[in-house]
């Protein structure tokens, strides 16, 4: 156990001891908190102590705990039926949710695939890119986190321990992420980190290691999450879109953390003025994925998703991409609808867009007082 038990009350300590005797040690815990109930942005432990919840279920609860609109959607659905597999039959809630996702998709002409989690959305994106292109190799990025199932884990490259003892399920060559703050490759005076990595890919990887015609897809986070919350160097996504168009590669974006209006737009990729082929999403969107009707994926209440362009999907055959028996279960779809409606009614992206201005006003004095904080990005290696 890597955390202190000093924060646990007597009831909480008893449950933690039972937890250690009955549950897998693979669950990583951050703090000795045993939750009893929650409301809005607060939660209470089993010993009656009150907390502010900054975790939000790891970027899941965008509208807070037990929001009335979400609770109502779940209650209404439970009164009708709990589960029918979408792979077997039809029902209107799945169609309603898919249409809402299409209406906010970051590309035109899409189809939606509903699954059970973010990592399943990524897995289905991998399969779709392989099937569409007939290729089996991919490009990923250092610092990335895309999930822990075997295909997704092949792309994950944020902590070595996450991949320890596992053989990759997919061939992935990892590139440096275009980090303007701490670039892995130092650019020349007239270059940006995006220019340097683009040159490295063109002149070294494509020349010495991989034929671009062998690559099925490039999977990237529009803003890297676990890798350090990194906004990429300007122009890099335009470059990726160009080489994907040139060589018939699928541009796959993972919006599982960066989507759901958190950046002032529904999708972080929209800030780049680039349309992907596949978008994976989950978490705050109620778990789903989408793709242009021809290429994309996305993937919490037991729903993951992917969006893809229609032309990517149209050639796919039934049962090649079938989800598990839950198939984005019914309650999850209702939660997704409730969240989407809540976002729309309260112009959530616009509210997120206004927040950084307040944050900047509060944070402006920090670099003067704390030398390890840089006032602005730098292309030089510094003490920051």
Image: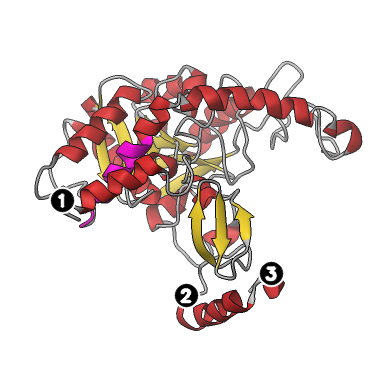
Circle 2 sits on which residue?
24
Q: Is residue 221 left or right of residue 98?
A: right
Cα–Cα gap, marks 2 and 1: 35 Å
Whether the magenta-drawn stretch holds residue 124 is answered as: no
* Above or below for 348 versus 300: above
Q: Position of residue 76 (x, y in %)?
A: 23, 47
Task: Look at the image and tell me whether residue 327 can be seen.
Answer: no
Closest to the camera, between mark 3 and mark 2, is 3
Residue interval drawn in magenta:
325-339
Closest to the camera, between mark 1 and mark 3, is 1
Whether the magenta-drawn stretch holds residue 327 is answered as: yes
Circle 3 sits on which residue?
7
Q: Say which quadrant the N terminus sits in.
A: bottom right
Q: Is residue 236 left or right of residue 185?
A: left
Numbered label tally: 3
Circle 1 sits on which residue?
80
Q: Position of residue 13 (x, y in %)?
A: 60, 78
Circles 2 and 1: CB atoms closer than 8 Å = no
Q: Tell me which label, 1 or 3, sits earlier in the chain.
A: 3
Q: Tell me which label, 3 or 2, sits earlier in the chain.
A: 3
């Amino acid at each position: 156990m890597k955390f202190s038990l000093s924060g646990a009350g007597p009831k909480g300590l008893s449950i933690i001891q039972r937890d250690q005797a009955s549950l897998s040690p693979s669950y990583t815990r951050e703090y000795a908190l045993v939750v009893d109930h929650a409301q809005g942005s607060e939660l209470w432990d089993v010993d009656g102590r009150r907390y502010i919840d900054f975790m939000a279920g790891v970027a899941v609860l965008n509208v807070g705990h037990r929001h009335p609109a979400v609770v109502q959607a779940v209650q209404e659905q439970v009164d009708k039926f709990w589960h029918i597999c979408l792979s077997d039959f039809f029902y209107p809630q799945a169609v309603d949710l898919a249409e809402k996702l299409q209406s906010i998709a970051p590309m035109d002409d899409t189809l939606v695939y509903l699954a059970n989690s973010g990592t399943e959305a990524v897995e289905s994106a991998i399969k779709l890119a392989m099937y569409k292109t007939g290729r089996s190799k991919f490009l990923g990025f250092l610092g990335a986190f895309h999930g822990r199932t075997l295909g997704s884990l092949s792309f994950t490259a944020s902590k070595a321990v996450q991949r320890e003892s596992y053989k990759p399920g997919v061939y992935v060559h990892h590139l440096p992420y275009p980090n303007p703050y701490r670039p892995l490759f130092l650019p020349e005076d007239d270059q940006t980190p995006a220019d340097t990595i683009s040159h490295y890919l063109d002149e070294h990887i494509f020349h010495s290691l991989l034929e671009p015609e062998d690559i099925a897809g490039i999977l990237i986070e529009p803003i890297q999450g676990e890798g350090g919350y990194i906004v990429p160097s300007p122009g890099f996504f335009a470059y990726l879109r160009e080489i994907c168009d040139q060589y018939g590669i699928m541009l796959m974006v993972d919006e599982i953390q960066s989507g759901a209006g958190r950046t002032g737009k529904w999708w972080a990729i929209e800030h780049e003025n680039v349309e992907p082929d596949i978008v994976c999403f989950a978490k705050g969107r109620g778990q789903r994925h989408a793709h242009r009707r021809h290429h994309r994926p996305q993937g919490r209440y037991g729903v993951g998703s992917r969006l893809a362009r229609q032309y990517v999907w149209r050639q796919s055959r039934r049962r090649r991409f079938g989800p598990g028996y839950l198939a984005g279960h019914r309650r999850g779809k209702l939660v997704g609808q409730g969240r989407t409606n809540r976002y729309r009614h309260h112009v959530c992206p616009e509210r997120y867009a206004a927040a950084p201005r307040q944050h900047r006003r509060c944070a402006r004095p920090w670099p003067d007082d704390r030398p390890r904080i840089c006032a602005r990005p730098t292309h030089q290696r510094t003490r920051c």
